[in-house]
Each structure stands twice: as C-alpha cells, then as structure tokens.
Image (spheres, rainbow, N blue to C red):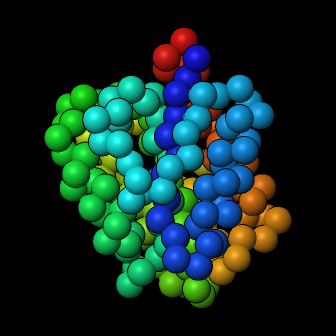
Amino acid sequence: MSKILVTYYTRSGHTQRMAEAIFNELKELGATVDLVKVDDINYAALPEYDAFIIGSPNYFGTMTGEVKTFFDKSVRHYRKLNGKVAAAFTSEGMIGGGGDAVVLDILKACLVHGMVTQGYTEIGHWGPVSIGDPDKRVLDECMVLAKDTFELVNKLFS
C-alpha cells in the first residue's frame, strides 16, 4: 500500500484547506497518508514515504522560507528519495501573482532529489493554484492531483 506525505505551510489557512482536500481524497482512495505541517516534519521518517505532496503559499513569486527550509533539511536524505513521487500546489493573493512559478520551484527541488513528477491535462499543468480561499474549482483540482498521484504511486510501487 502506498504511503504518502501531504505537507504544507500556511498563514491564512488557504493552503491548509487545499492540503486537507488532498488528504481527504487520498484517504478515500485507500492510501496510507499523513497530513503534517511543514514545521512539524519528522525528517528521519522521510525515506519511508512513497510520495510527497507539498503546498506553499506564494510569497514574492516563490515558496515560503518554511518550505525552502524543509528542502534544505531534507538534504540529509539525498539519494534516499530517488524515484519517489512528487506533486505540488499553492495559493496566492492575485491572478498573475506567480503561482505556477511556486509550483515549479517546489517540483524543481523534488527533481534534485531524483523524484518523479507528472504534468496534468485536466487541471493546471503543474498543479493546483488558488487565488485566495480555494473555491470549488480549485478543490476539485486538488482531488485530481490526489487521484493522479495515488495512481502513479501504485504504478511505480505495486
């Protein structure tokens, strides 16, 4: 059975709502999944996961310092996360605020670890981006991200 970590940072609660939607969909699909704020990560446990779904608000066109710190500290597991699955999502305050750049920054950090990711054809190409509080469309995209990640993990690790 796949083991997935959904982790995020939030100040306003918008990114947390997206993380919770992803977590709930993964539970419905039968995944073993943990929902953990990025500040509460157990770094020793990272190699136990098959997939990582990481969310960050958009601050100045990139991930927050807290999410960047997650990646900085995860370097102790360099090469141990190779082949794991990665996905990302973000929330921002305005249209055109750089949300796609945030998702790509997260995915680039995952690629440095050797993780596998996929593009999307049903939602935003790299992952969900919410403008403020996630609406039904964004929450539906979060469910697609969860489903596609779950299916990819099962293809790779079954």
Relative side of 100 to 84, left or right: right
Q: How many marks?
A: 0
Report the residue at 21% width, 36% height from top.
Answer: 77
- For image coordinates 59% across by 87% down, the residue present is 94
- Locate residue 144 relative to residue 83 in the image: left or right: right
Residue furthest out toward the right: 136
- Residues 130 and 22: in front is 22
Would you place residue 158 above or below residue 124 in this image? above
Extreme residue toward the bottom, this view = 94
Q: Quadrant of the C terminus?
A: top right
Q: Is residue 57 above or below residue 111?
A: below
Question: Residue at left 73%, top 42%?
Answer: 25
Q: Is residue 26 visible?
A: yes
Q: Quadrant of residue 79?
A: top left
Tell me the residue at 65%/60% (across/down). Answer: 18
Q: Is residue 107 above or below residue 32?
A: below
Q: Position of residue 105 (x, y in %)?
A: 36, 62
Where residue 114 sits, quadrant-wise, is top left
> Residue 136, how many percent across, how many down?
82, 65
In the rendered image, which quarter contains the N terminus? top right
Image quadrant assignment for residue 67: bottom left
- Residue 156, image x and y in percent? 49, 20
Residue 118 visible to an observer of this rendering: no
132 lies above or below 66: below
